[in-house]
Image: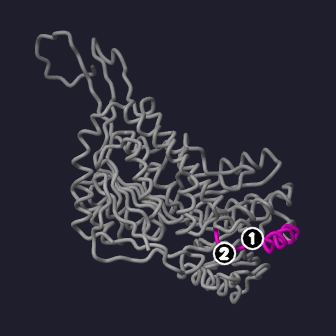
Amino acid sequence: MRTIPHWINGAPVEGGSDTIDVLDPATDQPVATVPMADAATVDAAIAAAANAFDSWAATALSKRAQVLYRFRELLLANRSELAAMITEEHGKTLDDAAGEISRAADSVELACGGPALARGGTSLQTGPNIDTKSVLHPLGVCVGITPFNFPAMMGMMMVSVALAAGNTFVWKPSEQDPGVCLRIAELFREAGLPDGVLNVVHGRQDTVEQLIDSPDTEAVSFVGSSKVAHIVYSRAAAAGKRVQAFGGAKNHMIVMPDADLDVVADQLTSACFGAAGQRCMAISVAVVVGDTAEPLLEKLVGRARQVRLGAGDAPDTEVGPVINRQSQQRIQAAVKEAVAAGARAVVDRSAEVVPGHEGGYFIGPTVLADVDVSSPAYQEELFGPVLVVMRVDSLNDGLALIANHRYGNGASIFTRDGAAANEFERRASAGMVGINVAIPVPVAAYAVQGWKDSAYGDTGLNNASWSFYTRPKYVTSRWDSVAGTDFGFRPN
């Protein structure tokens, strides 16, 4: 069985005596082992990044961009291999995993524009013969802590801009599917990235705490649950670090009475059940305005029952397993609890077993109606293929549901009414909003960022990261000679 080592200073490292198995979620069988870093290994990764910083920061912007251009081509050229690694360790379908690599490449392509995007500005004559300018400096050693659900894409949203801006990086991926992250580090080296600029360490909570607490790290980016995001944000901020931490979601889709229900049913089926619901932008609540809830439920029943469960590498699979046994059992328990509390299970495939993969962590598409707003099935992020269908009388009532929920990652509306769409766009309390788009993740030229308990910190990923991974310096200059003293504090 293969081992997935750390990557420090441009080479694999077997640091740490404690190892865990990486399991195939479709079979519950180990496919690799991964070492958990000890303190010395974490220190070595930070030291490698710190030692590489001055040289990398002094590298011309265009040369940094050239490395990123070469890496992007390697990323796409190896898309099939990388997708297969994700599928084996995560469980998502090969097609979905390949789409993740393409999205990761989009983030790298954005970073290739560093020479144009990582720039300051100049104002002439801010005073008599005085000019003022701003310049952007890299921070130093940056830390990225990424989740299991998008092991490649989330890493590239952080790493790409951080490196383009002149920082060095220590990446701590999820220990549940870390293989693709190591392969990405190898491809970066093949693209010409100097040793030490990107390092990968595997570990648990103690590794994260050491990375945050180190006096040699300057910034921390995190994606995971809101509970952990808040802890990371608080600890990093207390340590004086720049920090952005992205948490959970409960994304609502409002369905207006004029919406095409066939289109809505198709979009909900894809947006809720795709990737087994393990997307932070998955739709998990459908809010139906008016009297079309039952007709929509009828359409959802047929679609939910037809979704094909199976191993992610099987050609006919549409939905693979969830990431681990704990997630499977937690989601099943939430469905049972909701039904016991009075919810109606319109479709319940939560306990379905896939023939030939009886040990896999499968959860079939499940649709719940008549769920009370106090139910954990509505309030909590289940992170599984479970759709809650709510009924409201008006758009205003639907917007109130979104406003009163603790999460504010994404929200969508399906309608043919421009006035309703405009009102939703203006009032929806979420960071990413879709109009007739179920999963409104913006292109890389914009930002990925939620509101409320979905995000801690005031910057997002992708294009918004330029302000996170650089700090400004303001320079006021004058070159003509000025004689005489003046003890007043006057405008320029």
Residue farthest bottom in this picture: 340
Image point (88%, 68%), residue name:
295
The amino acid beneath tag 2 is Val
Q: Mark 2 — residue? A: 373
The residue singled out by tag 1 in the image is 390
Work out whether residue 264 or residue 80 is closer to the camera in this orientation and state it. 80
* x then y, percent, for residue 29: 52, 80
In contact (CB < 8 Å): disc 1 and disc 2: yes
Quadrant where the C terminus sits is: top left
Quadrant location, the N terminus: bottom left
Relative to 407, 465 lies left or right = left
Residue at 54% from the left image edge and 55% from the top image edge: 450
Q: With 90 as the anchor, is 471 left or right in this view?
A: left
Query: Magenta stretch: residue 301 in it?
Result: yes
Which residue corresponds to the image point at 55% horizontal and 40% vertical from the top-left? 445
Residue drawn at (26%, 23%), measured in percent from left and top? 476
| Total tally of numbered discs in the picture | 2
State the extent of the magenta-drawn residues as a range.
Answer: 295-312
